[in-house]
Amino acid sequence: MAIRVFVYSLLFLSVLSVLLSSDTKSIEEKQEERPLLTFHDSTLYVIGKDGIESMVNSKKALRYKNRDVLLDGKLVSKVKNEPNLVDSVNANIILKIEDNLTFMNDVNYTRGDFITLKTDQLDYDLKRKIAKNTTSFKGNYHGDSLKGTNLYLDLNKSIIKAKKSHFKINMN
């Protein structure tokens, strides 16, 4: 009889200690990691008074409380003041936090038919329209090749800067 009371008291104490030691904060953090919305094979159109201004396409779109994540995404937008000029960026992962976009893994940027850039990572500020990265990149500008690191691309002023850059001019 005494052994049975002892075993039951040990069982009761162990269950009580497990319940008291569980951290409610970790439960809240796990719930925050779940996306609020999920779309598969999604397309988003931004329509302005002049028609479609931009299009976002992705295999999977995840909306979290403080960020958006697009998997296998593509962003296409018209350039203001240039009706026939289009910017396009594809990446395996696109992360949007507030007004900043981060393109990761196999990033391809094109502007019209005269600029192409390929890199593994690109950060873009939507307000200032400036793209930057800290990794190596390859690109073409009007048929001439450009390679380097630490890209700085100002789309407002049409400025391209880079460190360790190598620019080959095609004379043909």
Image (cartoon, rainbow, N blue to C red):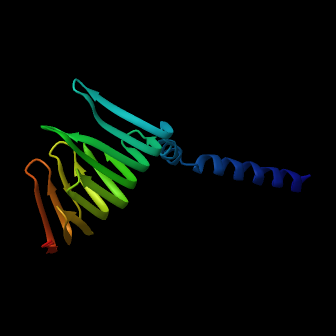
- Left/right placement of residue 14 relative to residue 126 reads right
User: In percent of the image, x 37 and y 43: which residue is there?
Assistant: 67
Q: Nearer the viewer, residue 149 or 95?
A: 149
Q: Quadrant of residue 121?
A: bottom left
Q: Is residue 141 visible?
A: yes
Q: Nearer the viewer, residue 72 or 128?
A: 72
Q: Is residue 98 visible?
A: no
User: In percent of the image, x 15 and y 71: which residue is there?
Assistant: 172
As displayed, is residue 95 above or below residue 105?
above
- Left/right placement of residue 17 relative to residue 105 reads right
> Residue 1's spot in the image, x, y percent?
92, 52
> Residue 23's spot in the image, x, y percent?
54, 48
Q: Nearer the viewer, residue 27 or 111?
A: 111
Q: Quadrant of residue 150?
A: bottom left
Q: Nearer the viewer, residue 95 or 67?
A: 95
> Residue 33's spot in the image, x, y percent?
48, 46
User: In percent of the image, x 36 and y 58: which residue is there?
Assistant: 104
